[in-house]
Amino acid sequence: MRFATLISWLLTASLGAFMLRTWLARGGLGRERARVGGLPPPLIFGHAGLALSGLLIWSGFVATGTRAVAWTAVGLLMVAISLGLCTVTLWTPYPARRPGEWRAPTDESPVVVPDNPAGVDGSPDEPESLVTDEMIAQLLAEPLRTGRPPPISLNPEVLVPIAHGFAAIGTFVLAVMAATM
C-alpha cells in the first residue's frame, strides 16, 4: 500500500509539475499579477510546495515505516488538496461558457407590474405575442429540424487538470489507508 501511494503521488506530482511548467512558460504568473483579482502566486506555489513536501515526507515513511511520519504526510496532503481546490474554484469561470456561445445581455432593470392588469373595459390586455393557427399548421406540416447534437470533443488542456484532481483524490485515499494499516 505504501508503494502504491508513492506511485500515485508521483503521478499526481508529475501532472502538477507539467501544469505549473506550462502555466509559467505561457506567462501565467505575470498575467495573474496584472489582473485585478487574479490568483495570488502564494496560492499556486503553496499548493505545489506543500504537495512536494508531503511527497518527500511520504518517501521517508516508505523508508522508515513510522506512523507519525505517514500522518504528517497525510496532513500536508490535505492542506495541499485544499489549496488545489481553492485554485480550481478561483480559476473556473462562472457561469461557464462554451467557445463561441452567445449570451443575451442581462437586463438588470426591475420588473414593473401594472396596478390594474385589466384594460379599460375590464378585459385583460392583449398579449405581446400570439400563437396563431397558421403558425401551428406550419409547424405540424414542417416540424423543426434539430439534427444531431454536435459530438463531445475533449480538450487535452482540460484533461490534464481533471486527471491531476482524480489522481490527488486517489493518492489521498491510498495514503490514509496506508497510514492506518
Image (cartoon, helix red, strand yellow):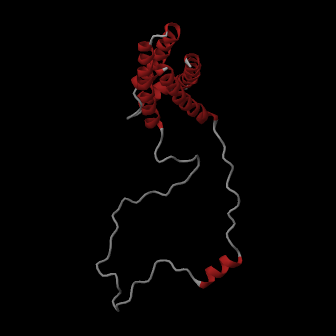
Q: Would you say 24 lies left or right of 123 here? A: right
Q: Nearer the viewer, residue 179 or 97?
A: 179
Most extreme residue toward the front, as rendered?
Answer: 181
Identity of the residue furthest to the top in this view: 64
Q: Quarter of the image holding residue 39?
A: top left
Q: Residue at x 60, y 84 (%)?
A: 133
User: Toward which corner of the image does residue 25 lie, by quadrant?
Assistant: top right
Residue 35 location (% of width, % of height): 41, 33
Looking at the rendering, which quadrant does residue 85 occupy?
top left
Q: Nearer the viewer, residue 176 or 154?
A: 176
Q: Position of residue 51 (x, y in %)?
A: 47, 20
Give the left or right position of residue 160, taking residue 42 as reference.
right
Instruction: Please tell me which residue is depicted at 47% across the width and 42% down the height of the picture.
Output: 93
For the N terminus, the image quarter is: top right
For this rendering, which residue is in front, 62 or 41?
62
Outermost residue, left direction? 115
Q: Nearer the viewer, residue 141 or 8?
A: 8
* Residue 87 sits above or below residue 98 on the image: above
Q: Is residue 72 above or below residue 109?
A: above
- For the point 39% across and 23% down, the residue is 42
Residue 66 pos. (x, y %): 45, 10
Left or right position of 88 against 134: left
How far across and how far down the image is residue 155, in percent? 63, 38
Please state the total of marks drawn on the protein image: 0
